[in-house]
Image (cartoon, rainbow, N blue to C red):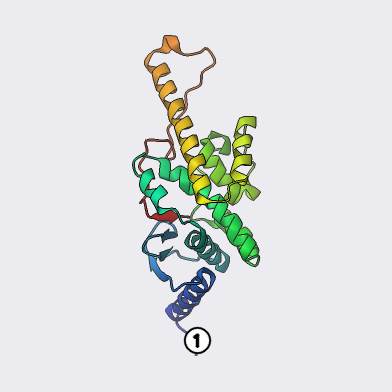
Amino acid sequence: MRLRKETWQSHLDETKRGLARLLARENLSVRHANVPTAMFDLKGRTLTLPKWENISVDQYDLLIGHEVGHALYSDDLDALKDAANYPGLHTYINVLEDVRIERRIKDEFPGLRGAFSRGYKDFVDHGPIFQLEKPVAEYDFIDRINIEYKIGAHHDVPFSDDERVVLSRLGKCRTMTQIVALAKEMWNGQKKKNEEEEDAQADPKSAPLDSDETGETASKPGSESESESESES
């Protein structure tokens, strides 16, 4: 007799809950919900997985591995509280911290490397996330960092020489405290750039002849920040 679909799904859910707890080395609360992506509540120690149709095993393992990375290595709750005072800073911290924790989780559990690689390819090919809506070069620097370190194997992501210096510094960050410091520096730099562009638009005579107008993106300082105690994929 063939098992019903929901029985298979239930079995998969329970297996992945066990995997998350095994990797995290603690009895995490793991739940499924109608959320846009996976997330981990650092304070409440709850890993939330989205209810997506047709999700592959590699995508599932990628999401779990990523969020367990936050459970193991994202340890500066005070930094996230501080970020709440600066609209948009949480996005910078989250993107940069994702780079650090994914590097660490793959170093500690090398068997996850294949799942990460195949899982990101599945997302690029089939969604539902990491579907780019415009050419890569048109994204802000922080967004291009996210693209490069997650699906860069499938896209040519351009960076200026100055931006590559920042990427080199990012690669040397070993702690969340260092990540937060770099995120604040980048956020302040972008904030200053935004203010200069707004001043130039308000007084066209003061704008340099080679200035370009740029559009606002979700990662631009001043946009709505995420919950202070959650890290999203």
Residue 100 drawn at (x, y percent):
56, 52
Say above or below: 5 vs 68. Answer: below
Which residue shows up at 38% across the image and 44% down it? 83
Q: In the rendered picture of this protein, how many numbered marks are placed on residues?
A: 1
Which of the pair 138/24 is nearer the observer? 24
Which residue shows up at 64% across the image and 49% down it? 154
User: Furthest residue to the top?
Assistant: 205
Label 1 CA crowd tier, 10 Å (few <14, some 14–19, many 20+): few
Amino acid bearing label 1: Arg
Residue bearing the label numbered 1: 2
Compared across the picture, whether 72 is left or right of 121 comes to left
Which residue shows up at 47% across the image and 46% down it? 93
Residue 146 drawn at (x, y percent):
54, 46
Which of the pair 67/82 is nearer the observer? 82
Residue 193 drawn at (x, y percent):
46, 26
Say above or below: 36 vs 166. Answer: below
Say above or below: 185 vs 154. Answer: above
Asked where in the image residue 108 lies, by quadrant, the reply is bottom right
Report if residue 118 is visible in the image: no
Element type at mark 1: loop
Which residue shows up at 49% across the image and 48% down it? 177
Compared across the picture, whether 176 is left or right of 221 comes to right
Which of the pair 201/17 is nearer the observer? 17
Report if residue 25 is visible in the image: yes
Residue 116 drawn at (x, y percent):
60, 60
Asked where in the image residue 38 lies, by quadrant, the reply is bottom left
